[in-house]
Each structure stands twice: as C-alpha cells, then as structure tokens.
Amino acid sequence: MSSPAISLDRISLSFKRAFLFHEFSLEIPGGQTTCLLGPSGVGKSSLLRLIAGLEARDSGTVTCEGALPLRGNFSYMAQQDLLLPWLRLRENVSLSDRLQGRAPDPGRAEGLIRRVGLAGHEDKRPAALSGGMRQRAALARTLYQERDIILMDEPFSAVDSITRLELQDLAAEVFHDRTVLLVTHDPLEALRLGHQLLVLAGQPVEITQRIAPTGNPPRDTGAEEMPELHKLLIDSLRRAHAQAMDRQREGQSVE
Ligand SMILES: Nc1ncnc2c1ncn2[C@@H]1O[C@H](COP(=O)(O)OP(=O)(O)OP(=O)(O)O)[C@@H](O)[C@H]1O
C-alpha cells in the first residue's frame, strides 16, 4: 500500500489576532513529495507544525487517508536539529527506538550515518560537530524512523552545495513512495525533488503557484523543461516577496 495522502480542511490559525491561515484547505498527495516555497515569515514552518500537531489551530481538521492516525506515522525534521547534546551521534540517530522502548538497530544507524557522510564520527556528541554535520545527523535520524510520512523544514540549508546535491540524491531515494512535505528556500532543490511545488504568499496564506515537473526525482536540473519552470518559480517567488515587503511597510507605517 502506498503512503497515505493528507488533507487539510478549512484550517485557521492566528497569532496576535491576525490570521496566518484562514479557512485554508490543501490536499497533499500520498506517496509523493510536495515542496513548499515562499517568502520568509509567510507560514511554511507553521503549516508543517500544524500537520505535526505542534501548533494549536483555531479551527479546521488535518486528516490522513484511510483514517490512519497521523500521530506515530510521521517523522519531523525541524529547522533546529534538536539533537540531544548528551547523546553520541549513533544514539541520536536511533533515538526513536529508545523513546519507544525498542532495541536500537546499530547496523541501520551506522549505514545511515555513512550515507550522510558522517562515518568516523559515530561516537561524537553534537557539540563536536559543525552546523552542517549536525544537519546531516538530523537527516539520518529522520530517515532512521522509516515512517510513511516525512515532514522536513529546510533540511539541507546548512550544507555546502556539493554535499547538498548528494543529500538530495539520498533523500530522493528514501522519499520514494512516501508522502513528503519539504520546506525549502532553494528553487532548484524543489525542482529536483518535488512532484509538486507550491508557492505560498499573502496573509492569510494562499497558494499562488503550483508547478508539477515531469519525470521522477532526483531530476536533472539540466533537463529541457527546467529553465522555463525555474523562471516561473522565481517570478512567483518575486511576486510573493514583493507582497510581503509591502505588507511589512504598511505594518511599519501603522505602528
Ligand atoms: N508561536 C508564535 N507566536 C507568534 N507568532 C508566531 C508564532 N509562530 C510563528 N509566528 C509568526 O507566524 C509567521 C509565520 O512564521 P513561520 O515560521 O511559519 O514562517 P516561515 O515561512 O516558515 O519563515 P522562514 O522561511 O523564515 O522559516 C511569522 O510572522 C511568525 O512571526
């Protein structure tokens, strides 16, 4: 059975009496990767947190296809790596087993540590790792959980561009047939990894652009359709950014 779709139905979420989301609905297809893009502060992380149950919404529902409970079916990689400082890398990667009272699988943890390029660092604690290494460790921990649904918030933002490409290849392999929601600020990353790309803009949030590149991830960014899709994406991100700047200026002039 393929991984379940997720439905958001008329979700509202407000902060300081202003709606970030108002009656917002979205279908996230099962077994595919959906990338969320948009200006800083538009609400991408909040949307992920809503789905993860970490944000208390005013109203609306988040449901999983087949009435599966979302809880226990997803892994979530936040912007902060959330590694436990007192645990060694191998223990951090297999943390989900420990938390659920299962015996960790050291072979699987070590295999993933190797695949994210951290072999040799298994016994180090997070403080001894660089920001990019910690992000790779958090990726290994997320993949270790082997959940049907994966929520990721800018998972590759702190790594150099070549490592980023390598991690995207690994992610595309692991994402295969899973339901993935990936927040990224990198248009090329979205074009490589996403079955569908959504641009969020405005307040309350709307989806102002949907792009569905052809072919399977990880895509070759040199493919024929890429320049056109890249331009489409950049243009809509520019519009979303300009809208956010206007709103910020209006806010400043009211204060
Ligand atoms: N707990 C909170 N209390 C008050 N405001 C909040 C809270 N969480 C988020 N916000 C506000 O909601 C808006 C959206 O934040 P969010 O982190 O979802 O944006 P984002 O699109 O993920 O931004 P970035 O790309 O910079 O990570 C921001 O204006 C933020 O200040």
Image (spheres, rainbow, N blue to C red):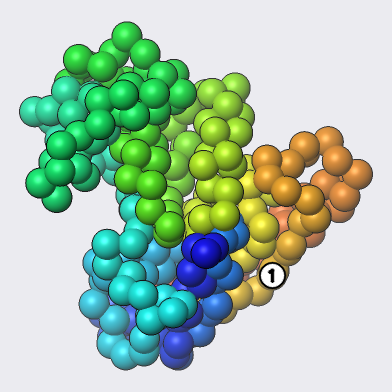
Q: Quadrant of the C terminus?
A: bottom left
Q: In front: 205, or 116?
A: 116
- Is any atom of residue 130 visible in this view? yes
List the single residue furthest toward the right: 224
Q: In front: 140, or 130?
A: 140
Cβ of disc 1 within 8 Å of ligand 1? no
- Up/down of 113 relative to 54, above or below: above
Q: Tell me if 21 is positioned left or right of 54 in this view.
A: right
Q: Position of residue 63 (x, y in %)?
A: 39, 80
Label 1: how many Cα within 10 Å (few below 14, some 14–19, many 20+): some
Q: Position of residue 185 (x, y in %)?
A: 55, 48
Q: At label 1, which amino acid type do we have?
A: Gln
**Residue at coordinates 29% horizontally, 43% vertically from top-left?**
80
Q: Tell me if 212 is positioned left or right of 9 in this view.
A: right
In which quadrant of the rendered view does residue 201 lie? bottom right
In which quadrant of the rendered view does residue 33 lie? bottom right
Q: Position of residue 205 (x, y in %)?
A: 50, 77
Q: Position of residue 228 (x, y in %)?
A: 86, 52
Q: Secondary structure at mark 1?
A: strand
**Residue at coordinates 10% horizontally, 46% vertically from top-left?**
101
- Is any atom of residue 202 visible in this view? no
The residue beneath circle 1 is 209
In which quadrant of the rendered view does residue 173 lie? top right
Q: Tell me if 252 is positioned left or right of 121 in this view.
A: right
